[in-house]
Image (tube, rainbow, N blue to C red):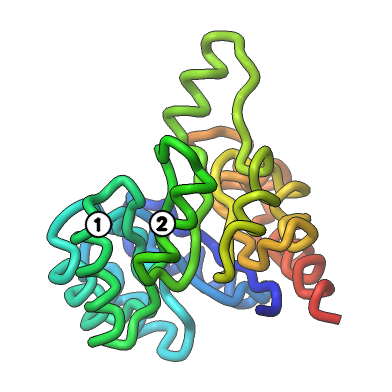
Amino acid sequence: MKPIVQISLDLTTIEEALETAELAMRAGVDWLEAGTPLILAEGLHGVRKLRERFPDTPIVADLKTMDGGYLEAEMMAKAGATHVVVMERAHPETIKCVVQAGRDFNVAVMGDNLGSDCMIDGARRLEDLGCDYIVHHIGYDERRGIAARGERMPSPLDQLREVVAAVSIPVQAVGGLSIEQAVKCPEYGAPLVVLGAPLTIDADSFRTADGNLEESLRRICEAVHAYRD
């Protein structure tokens, strides 16, 4: 798979999300993600609005599904999502239900290994159950809590090569990566580069240090897309 750039719209209003998505697309971003905060705030309405504005762009709905898998995936597919996210910590039957809905409604399934007892085994399990992509994910609360205790904050890069080697489906790394680290993910064999928190100067604010998000995204997209050459 050729490297692509996905921006996570971790915003809480559709107006902000659409504005950010517009500049992201101008900058060369390939995929849009309706982040969990946006889905919680705007639900299906937010995904529909993104689909209306961007009819040909892949849209990831970061549901973090734990139960009711078929219905959640179906609803997001009908709203216009092309990808949905299910958690490895969910019951196997839930993962199977999301995968079945993906097949029924032509939606790709991304399996998220956040919180797995073993991230590598979790990725294998997600592939074995039929997921199309792996999200190798170190959670926000986990990172902040460990750092607050003065310990080294974990990074998805710690085991990224092992996760990539353990599965035959595309992998993306998420969780506390700097811009420089995110851009280098294709060197680890993970072609799906996700941008969200790496663009912040404040963990609770979606903005870049120089205030120019569009120009920052353009430079990032150029760097990631250069791996295609």
41 or 149, nearer to the observer: 149
Residue in the picture at 72% in, 62% down = 189
**Residue 148 placement (x, y as % from top left):** 52, 13
The amino acid on which the numbered mark 1 sits, given as a three-letter code, is Pro
State which quarter of the image contains the C terminus: bottom right
Q: Quadrant of residue 92?
A: bottom left
Which residue is the extreme one toward the right? 229
Q: Which residue is mark 1?
A: 92
Is the residue under label 2 in contact with that under label 1 (CB below 8 Å)? yes
Cα distance in 3D space between marks 1 and 2: 9 Å
Residue in the picture at 65% in, 73% down = 4
Vertical relation: 74 (above or below) 140: below
**Mark 1 Cα within 10 Å, few/some/many (few <14, many 20+)?**
some
**Mark 2 Cα within 10 Å, few/some/many (few <14, many 20+)?**
some
The amino acid on which the numbered mark 2 sits, given as a three-letter code, is Arg
Q: Earlier in the sequence, mark 1 or mark 2?
A: 1
Q: Which mark is residue 125?
A: 2
Q: Secondary structure at mark 2?
A: helix
State which quarter of the image contains the N terminus: bottom right
Q: Secondary structure at mark 1?
A: helix
**Residue 31 placement (x, y as % from top left):** 53, 74
58 or 52, nearer to the observer: 58
Residue in the picture at 69% in, 73% down = 3
Vertical relation: 112 (above or below) 29: above
Q: Is residue 2 left or right of residue 50?
A: right
**Residue 167 placement (x, y as % from top left):** 57, 63
**Residue 224 placement (x, y as % from top left):** 76, 67
